[in-house]
Image (tube, helix red, strand yellow):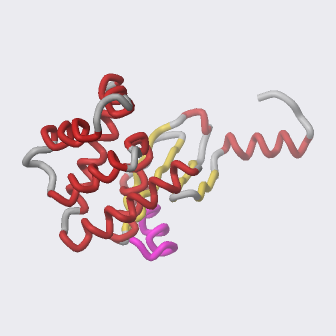
Amino acid sequence: MIERTLARRYAAALLRVTGPEGSTDEAEALLQALQDAYEKDPSFRAVLAQPRIPRKMKKALFRRALEGRALPSFLQFLDLLVDKNRLDLFPVLAEAFGQLADESRGLARVQVRSWRPLSEAHRQRLEGQIARLTGKRVTVQSETDPRLRGGMLVRLGNTVMDGSVARRLKLAREHLGLQGN
């Protein structure tokens, strides 16, 4: 929980810099790439976590890796993370920055799990309904999960709306005092 709060603060600080200079998309892509490297490459994670490697060397590593791809403000942000010993925030920092960037763009990303693939008409209708509710532009990311047995599960930020048949069956079993699947 503390990690997410810290990541959100750092992400908000970066957004305050990248917004006015028009580099929010670039920063988001670079943070995502760094998050992917952090999660997938144990040697990268080990180097960043190693206290015996001087901060100066860690900063140089980032500068070499991002040379020509990152603005000075982004490199200064990475320097700050190194100085504050907060490189362990990469896994949640990219997510927090993405959420804040979406909010600043007036964009809501909705994740939908349905028991069968959504038709394009259904996707557009869902986007329209959520756009009216939130007052934001909406993009729907969908995946299929046959375990839902029908209906769908919609996630918008921290809000989850579960209209799946599996959930309704579970509630009915609980109401009737039945055990099992």
Give the vertical position of 107 relative to 3 (above or below).
below
Q: Is residue 129 magenta?
A: yes
Q: Main secondary structure of the magenta part?
A: helix
| Whether residue 67 can be seen here | yes
Farthest residue in the top direction?
43
Q: Does residue 39 appear left or right of residue 78 in this picture? A: right
Residue 34, image x and y in percent?
29, 40
Give the vertical position of 138 relative to 39 (above or below).
below
Q: Please identify the quarter of the rendering in which residue 137 is found.
A: bottom left
Q: Does residue 96 appear left or right of residue 40 in this picture? A: right
What residue lies at 59% left-to-right and 58% top-to-bottom?
A: 159
Q: Is residue 42 magenta?
A: no
Q: Nearer the viewer, residue 88 or 18?
A: 88
Residue 85, image x and y in percent?
40, 44
What residue lies at 48% left-to-right and 55% top-to-bottom?
A: 6
The number of discs equals 0
Q: Please identify the quarter of the rendering in which residue 91 is found.
A: top left
| Whether residue 121 can be seen here | no
Which residues lie in the magenta part? 125-136
Image quadrant in which the C terminus is located: top right
Q: Nearer the viewer, residue 42 or 62?
A: 62
What residue lies at 28% left-to-right and 50% top-to-bottom?
A: 78
What residue lies at 23% left-to-right and 56% top-to-bottom?
A: 76
